[in-house]
Amino acid sequence: MLKPLGDRVLLQVNDEKEQTVGSIVIASNAQEKSATGTVVAVSETTVGDLEAPKSVKIGDEVIYDQYAGKEIKNDGETYLVLHERDIMAIL
């Protein structure tokens, strides 16, 4: 399993639902990407001399900035690594 470093969090992005307008299905490449995910790993390291408690824990469903982070593929799964500050809310 990947272990995030610094103030980073590893998410498994929730599946995107097919979007429609009326009865027209929008092409998958024209849809907005999902901005919700499940936390699968949280960094155990600190940044500099600051040691702040983490605001999320493994298993939390979160909403994040849709343009944040970096997609990573590992063992056939796709994950998103992002800074904890890019998480906007816990569902």
Image (cartoon, rainbow, N blue to C red):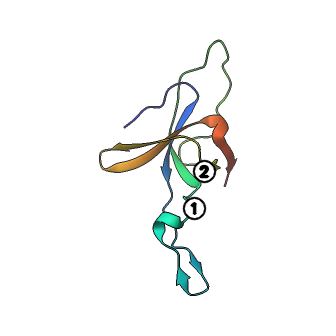
In the rendered structure, are the residues bearing label 2 and label 1 in contact, judged by CB atoms less than 8 Å apart? Answer: yes
**Res. 2 image quadrant:** top left
Mark 2, secondary structure of its residue: loop
Percent of width and height locating residue 87? 65, 43
Quarter of the image where the C terminus is located:
bottom right
Crowdedness near tag 2: few (<14), some (14–19) or many (≥20) residues, C-alpha within 10 Å: few
Left or right: where 65 falls relative to 28: right
Picture layout, residue 60 above or below residue 18: above
- Residue occupying the point 53% across, 26% down: 44
Percent of width and height locating residue 7? 58, 28
Q: Is residue 10 visible?
A: yes
- Residue occupying the point 59% across, 46% down: 67
Which residue lies under the disc numbered 1? 32
Crowdedness near tag 1: few (<14), some (14–19) or many (≥20) residues, C-alpha within 10 Å: few
Q: Earlier in the sequence, mark 2 or mark 1?
A: 1
Percent of width and height locating residue 72? 41, 42
Percent of width and height locating residue 76? 30, 50
**Res. 34 image quadrant:** bottom right
In the rendered structure, which amino acid carries the disc numbered 2?
A: Gln
Q: Which mark is residue 66?
A: 2
Mark 1, secondary structure of its residue: loop
